[in-house]
Image (cartoon, rainbow, N blue to C red):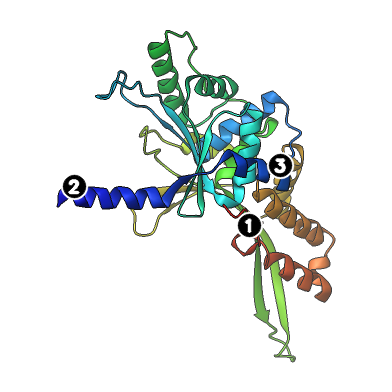
Amino acid sequence: KKNFFNRVLSNNILSIVRAISPEKIKEIIKINNVQSTLNDDQFGYYLAGLLEGDGHLSLPFLGKTSLNRILNPRIVFTAHVNDLALYVHIQQRLGGIGRFQLSNESVIRYIIGDKQGIITFINIVHNKLRTPKNKSLNDLIEFMNQKYDLAIPKSNIDESNILTNSWFTGFTEADGSFGVKIVESKSKGDNKKSVSSNISLKFRLDQRLIDKKTSLSMESIMENIAQSLSCNLLTYKKSKSDDNILSVYVSAIDKVKILVDYFNIYPLLGIKNKNFKDWEKVYYMILSKEHLTEKGIIEIKLIHSNMNSKRIHLNYDI
């Protein structure tokens, strides 16, 4: 009975998780090729930020399995299928290393698990991480050094200004969000039927206070981000959980300018860039007072109706 259950479970897992073929990847490159002006150094900062948001470093035990196989560590990025073109672009920038999986028809995994691929990845993000995940990277470096008799030095925490490289772009690509808030209010004057719209922008980036894998605090880096954006760092408890969440929240129009300027120097590369561009458009409409006109309100509502989860994406048919 137990063996039967294990077989059924295994079959279900196999039906849920499947590889994305190289042929399909080639098709995606033709359909939607992500363009980037980042040089190799800035791409490394971007990748480090993305890793610290959406990445996972997995280490096996050091040695051989019962089947005499030598296991390698894995670097795994997890994202929505809408960002497949982004990860195909990343794979190309890294020289074609890694492979792709599709899970539940909506989640992709970009997996780097071969020796040379892991070394390539370590080299490009080395000394560019800012969060407790740098400890996990150093654990990976130590593992690779022991297993392959290498001499890769430890990675140091990057303490440079947040806004002087593309690390924050990668981190935002993973965990940041851009939104437009529209509050309808009825007039209190003689014309009770008239309705006005209060329109504002919001940027939000949340992280758990304690990094689960390392048990280290995220407060220092989140406070650094908040200070760089001239905003306060908020704390709240996640519903149905004991997790304390740190939140960077920007809505003041003069603080929004910091983000607009930054992301035009270090642009987002994935689907989130489309949301940023819509968000930026509303920002300039607010500056020019267009958001106070009937025509402007209608246009902003249309923009809002197609942002984030409401956006219609290209169907890759994978």
- The amino acid beneath tag 3 is Val
| Residue 223 showing in the rendered view | yes
- The answer for how far apart the CA atoms under marks 3 and 1 are is 16 Å
**Residue sitting at x 61%, y 33%:** 91
Choose top left, top right, bottom left or bottom right for residue 215: top left
In the image, residue 206 lies at what x, y percent? 51, 48
Mark 1 secondary-structure assignment? loop
Circle 2 or circle 1, nearest the eye: 2
Mark 2 secondary-structure assignment? helix
Marks 3 and 2 close (CB-CB < 8 Å): no
- The amino acid beneath tag 1 is Asn
- The amino acid beneath tag 2 is Asn
**Above or below, comparing residue 176 to residue 137 in the picture:** below
Label 3 Cα crowd, 10 Å radius (few <14 / some 14-19 / many 20+):
some
- The answer for how far apart the CA atoms under marks 2 and 1 are is 39 Å
| Residue 230 showing in the rendered view | no
**Residue hosting label 2:** 3
**Residue sitting at x 68%, y 59%:** 201
Would residue 307 appear left or right of 133 to someone viewing this image?
A: right
Dot placed on the residue nearer the N-terminal end, 2 or 1: 2
In the image, residue 290 lies at what x, y percent? 83, 66
Q: Which mark is residue 34?
A: 3
Label 2 Cα crowd, 10 Å radius (few <14 / some 14-19 / many 20+):
few
Marks 3 and 1 close (CB-CB < 8 Å): no
**Residue hosting label 1:** 315
**Residue sitting at x 37%, y 35%:** 213
Dot placed on the residue nearer the N-terminal end, 3 or 1: 3
